[in-house]
Image (tube, helix red, strand yellow):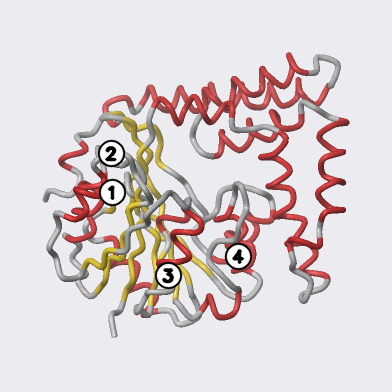
Amino acid sequence: MTSLTVIMAAYNAERYVSAAIDSILNQTYTDFELIIADDGSNDKTRKIIDSYTDPRIVISHNQFNRGKVATVNSLIEKARGQYLTIHDADDISRLDRFELQIAALVDDCQVDMVGSNYISFMSNRLMSTSNLPLDSEMISSFLEDRKPALHGPTTILRMKVLDKVGPLYRNFTHGEDIDFNLRFIGYFKAKNLCDPLYYYRMNKTSLTKSIRYFNNERVINSDLIYKLHGIRLRTPNINDLEKLEDVKLELLQKTIKDPSYPFRFGANYLYHQGLNLNSWLLSVKSITNNPLDFKNYVCFMEISFLTIKSEIRNLISRKKRFLNIHEINKK
């Protein structure tokens, strides 16, 4: 039986997928299978994937674009591993990542998921290094407070977890990782390793998109995930999305009454993701959207203070702000 299953769904990732695959195949921990699918790309992604001959790779391409949620769930059905991780097609893992995380799971049978901190980068510029909570209690607390606590692609979990909490991803428009994490902490414990073992790639398009990303649909989706979590805490057997149309309507009314709410929500979310400028821009947008709401000015002042503080810290450590992405996994 293979120890670890690595799942990768790739879509139009021709520029980066080789680096992602290589960072997996060159891991110091070697007992794994990589199940990978090209999700109907219209570039050379499929050709690049097919060029690999490593016997640990299992290829299962889609004939058309199904989306990440459907693709990942279908690939998991083919998994043979005792452990599971989902790796994005444009990111990079440090070469000792699997070894360190599997060792943490083996050493502590009370923990069923191990993540790590991560480095966000764009081209050769280091954007931010995460500072996630490390122990199970703090992770649960952060999740309840809607703060980043587990970065999905950095995590490795025991496959048996899915038998208890259901599918890894459910059909949410956004926030499928958060939905899974909230279901997970209801039954199991997680921890994060302090070292950043994962490199999360950003680009200018994703930065711009992150500002437009926070609209009524995005916020309602997030609120729905937490509403479901609250319902599970009170009534564990109620968990059907299709029975919650009344809840969706209630959440929609909230955003109609306070149209600047999505921007405050987004400002706080992006700040905790290390996207300080985008966070600040959304706090400004909350004011321009509704200049009579005092909450928007409070949000703006808080984000401005935190952004200035963070940028001063970045200036002090300027010499550490650049990296050669090609040298990440070279000793």
Find residue 41 and report its image quarter.
top left
Q: Position of residue 270 (x, y in %)?
A: 56, 34
Q: In the rendered image, which residue does mark 4 sit on?
A: 137
Precedes in sequence: disc 2 or disc 1? 2
C-alpha gap between disc 4 and disc 1:
28 Å
Residue in the image at 66% along x and 40% along y: 218
> Which residue is the extreme one toward the bottom?
1
User: Vertical placement of 223 versus 116: above or below?
Assistant: above
Can the viewer see residue 134 in this picture?
A: yes
Tell me the kind of residue under disc 2. Answer: Asp
Precedes in sequence: disc 3 or disc 2? 2
Q: What label does residue 76 carry, if any? A: 3
Find residue 234 and report its image quarter.
bottom right
Q: In the rendered image, which residue does mark 1 sit on?
A: 92
Tell me the kind of residue under disc 4. Answer: Glu
Q: Are marks 1 and 3 in contact (CB under 8 Å)?
A: no
Q: In the rendered image, which residue does mark 2 sit on?
A: 43
- Does residue 81 appear left or right of residue 136 in this picture? left
C-alpha gap between disc 3 and disc 4:
28 Å
Q: Are marks 3 and 2 in contact (CB under 8 Å)?
A: no
Per the image, label 2 sits on a secondary structure element best described as loop
C-alpha gap between disc 2 and disc 1:
20 Å
Q: Position of residue 160 (x, y in %)?
A: 49, 81
C-alpha gap between disc 2 and disc 4:
44 Å
Q: Residues within 10 Å of mark 2 (few under 14, many from 20)?
A: few
Judge depth for marks 3 and 4 and give the one in front. Answer: 3
User: Vertical placement of 320 versus 280: above or below?
Assistant: below
User: Vertical placement of 279 versus 25: above or below?
Assistant: above
Judge depth for marks 2 and 4 and give the one in front. Answer: 2
Tell me the kind of residue under disc 3. Answer: Ile
